[in-house]
Image (cartoon, grey):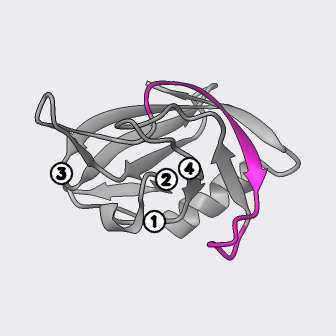
Amino acid sequence: MNFILTNTDFLATGIFGEMTSEDGSVSFKTLQHAYPFVLNQVWAPKVSFGVYNCIRHSPVRLPYTTFMLQNVPDFQGKPVTGILIHVLNFDSESEGCIGIGLNRIGDTEITHSKDAFNKFMDLQVGIENFKLTVC
């Protein structure tokens, strides 16, 4: 199942958004780590706008299988690798990955991330890759 990630709030406490299936039937709250973007004095995620192929991945650093974004452009002059979709609730739990949850609390966190992640992975059973459009 393909998804569209729309970033809505670019805050020092995280980049918040919503990840919705292409058909609009499923939606998750998202959170990515916020990095200062010096030129405009704003906050930015590592994952820029674009379309990404996401492949099923079993990372060493996490005890579960997830999906990894391929060919993420350089960010602030440095290569970007290892961007995953995974369980997280706060900006500090990510170095650029995309966390998904069911709800958002103010400007600090997303909640029920494990539940959202499990639902997301249930939707992707038997799927080895999917398209993620970030806007």
Residue linked to disc 1: 88
- Asked whether, in this view, residue 22 is left or right of residue 11, the answer is right
Neighbour class for label 2 at 10 Å: few (<14), some, many (≥20)? many
Give how far across and how far down residue 117 sits, in percent. Answer: 59, 60
**Residue at image x 77%, y 50%?**
56
Is residue 1 visible in the rendered structure shown here?
no
Q: In the image, is residue 37 part of the stretch drawn in magenta?
A: no
- Asked whether, in this view, residue 127 is left or right of residue 69, the answer is right
Real-space CA distance between mark 2 and mark 3, rounded to the nearest whole angstrom:
16 Å
What type is the residue that disc 3 sits on? Ala
Q: In the image, is residue 49 part of the stretch drawn in magenta?
A: yes
Q: Which residue lies furthest to the front in this view?
A: 77
Label 3: element kind: loop
Real-space CA distance between mark 2 and mark 4, rounded to the nearest whole angstrom:
5 Å
Placement of 31 over or under 132, stated as above or below = below
What type is the residue that disc 1 sits on? Leu
**Residue at image x 45%, y 65%?**
88
Q: Which residue lies furthest to the right in this view?
A: 126
| Pick the front one: 2 or 78 | 78
